[in-house]
Amino acid sequence: MLWSMKSQRILSAMALGAALGFAPALGWSQTSSTPSHDDGVKHNVKAAGHETKDVAKDAGHGVKRGATTAAHATENGTKKVWHKTKSTTSGAVHGAKEGAEKKTD
């Protein structure tokens, strides 16, 4: 009885090994009625291209908005400095006139 169980186990292992060994060869030899693998790859590449385009557009819009904000901030800062310089300069000129008009005793 022990010998028949051992031989049955060996026979089962050999059958399983043969099935696993021939399965890839049988799978590769079959023709498929489903769309080929290339169609899936083509679709994936197209999708990646569209996503890349969308990301580039979003990045471009972000850069444009950032540049516009920076330009406005620079313009406002320049105007502010110009006004402060103007008032300081006119104050200095006025002070110089007063100093020149003072008579020293």
Image (cartoon, helix red, strand yellow):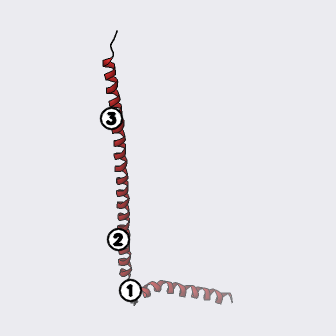
Q: Which amino acid does label 2 sit on?
A: Gly
Question: Closer to the N terminus: mark 1 or mark 2?
Answer: 1
Q: Label 3: which residue?
A: 86
Query: Looking at this view, is 63 or 23 the one in front?
Result: 63
Q: What residue type is labelled 1?
A: Pro
Question: Closer to the N terminus: mark 3 or mark 1?
Answer: 1
Residue at image location 41% in from the left, 85% down from the top = 28
Q: From the top left corner, tell me how far across and down residue 69 is, in percent.
A: 37, 52
Nearer the viewer's eye, disc 1 or disc 2? 2
Quadrant in the picture for residue 91: top left
Q: Label 2: which residue?
A: 49
Query: Looking at this view, is 33 or 66 the one in front?
Result: 66
Q: What residue type is labelled 3?
A: Lys
Q: Label 1: which residue?
A: 35
Number of numbered discs on residues = 3
Q: From the top left corner, tell me how far across and down residue 95 is, in percent.
A: 34, 24
SS at mark 1 in the image: loop
Q: From the top left corner, tell me how far across and down residue 54 is, in percent.
A: 37, 67
How many other residues sit within 10 Å of disc 1, few (<14), some (14-19) or many (≥20)? few
Residue at image location 57% in from the left, 88% down from the top = 11
Quadrant in the picture for residue 80: top left
How many other residues sit within 10 Å of disc 3, few (<14), some (14-19) or many (≥20)? few
Nearer the viewer's eye, disc 3 or disc 1? 3
Measured Cα–Cα span from mark 3 to mark 1: 76 Å
Residue at image location 33% in from the left, 19% down from the top = 99
Query: Looking at this view, is 5 or 75 the one in front?
Result: 75
SS at mark 2 in the image: helix
Residue at image location 50% in from the left, 84% down from the top = 20
Measured Cα–Cα span from mark 3 to mark 2: 55 Å
Quadrant in the picture for residue 57: bottom left
